[in-house]
Image: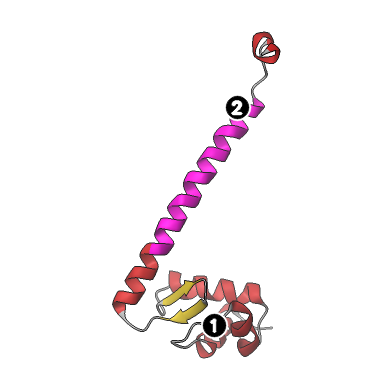
Amino acid sequence: MRTDRDNVSAVLAALDAQPATLRSVALRAGLPRRRVEEAIEAIRRDGIALVCSGPEGVWLARSVSEAAENIEARRRRAITQLQTVRGERRLLRRLAEPLTLWEGAA
């Protein structure tokens, strides 16, 4: 059975400076797509390499400035997703509250 370290090594070997889909990286690494996603998260989280991502796929950063721009774009997406979840949680709380008689008649 492959370890997380093996998966990270396989994904790093499958990546280069040209964008590739997760599917193609998975095929090159010999891993399921989900393991590739987990390995990329570990690579980023553990500061092993700068992996960029976008609509065209994933790739190793060609420069520090490219990596910085990509990291900022992913940060903005993460914040937007958190704001969306906050709105959904507010709706859940409202839906969980019992209706009063006058609210149900409107």
**Among the two numbered marks 1 and 2 on one chain, the one whose residue lies closer to the N terminus:** 1
- Circle 2 Cα neighbour tier, 10 Å, few/some/many (<14 / 14–19 / ≥20): few
Task: Check disc 2 and report the residue beneath it.
Answer: 94
Among the 4 quarters of the image, the one containing residue 76 = bottom left
- Farthest residue toward the front? 106
The C terminus, quarter of image: top right
Badge 1: few (under 14), some or many (20 or more) residues near its Cα, within 10 Å?
many
Residue at the image point whose x is 29% and y is 75% from the top: 65
Q: Residue 106 versus residue 4: which sits nearer the camera?
A: 106
Which residue is at the front of the view, 58 or 6?
58
x and y, in percent, of residue 50 in the image: 40, 77
Q: What element carries label 1?
A: loop
Which SS does the magenta portion mostly show? helix
Tell me the amino acid under the disc marked 2: Arg
Instruction: Please state the horizontal and vertical placement of residue 39, each as a whole percent of the image.
Output: 55, 76
19 relative position to 47: left or right = right
Report the magenta residues as a range. Answer: 73-96
In this rendering, would 27 be left or right of 82? right
Taking the spot 57% from the left edge, 85% from the top edge, the residue there is 6
| CA–CA distance in space, label 1 to label 2 | 43 Å
Q: Which mark is residue 3?
A: none
Q: Residue at x 38, y 67 (%)?
A: 71
The residue wearing badge 1 is 20
Viewer-side label of 1, 2: 1
Tell me the kind of residue under disc 1: Ala
Q: Which of 49 and 1 is in front in this view?
A: 49
Q: In this view, does 65 lie above or below 14?
A: above
Is 64 contained in the magenta span? no
**Would you say 81 lies left or right of 35 here?**
left
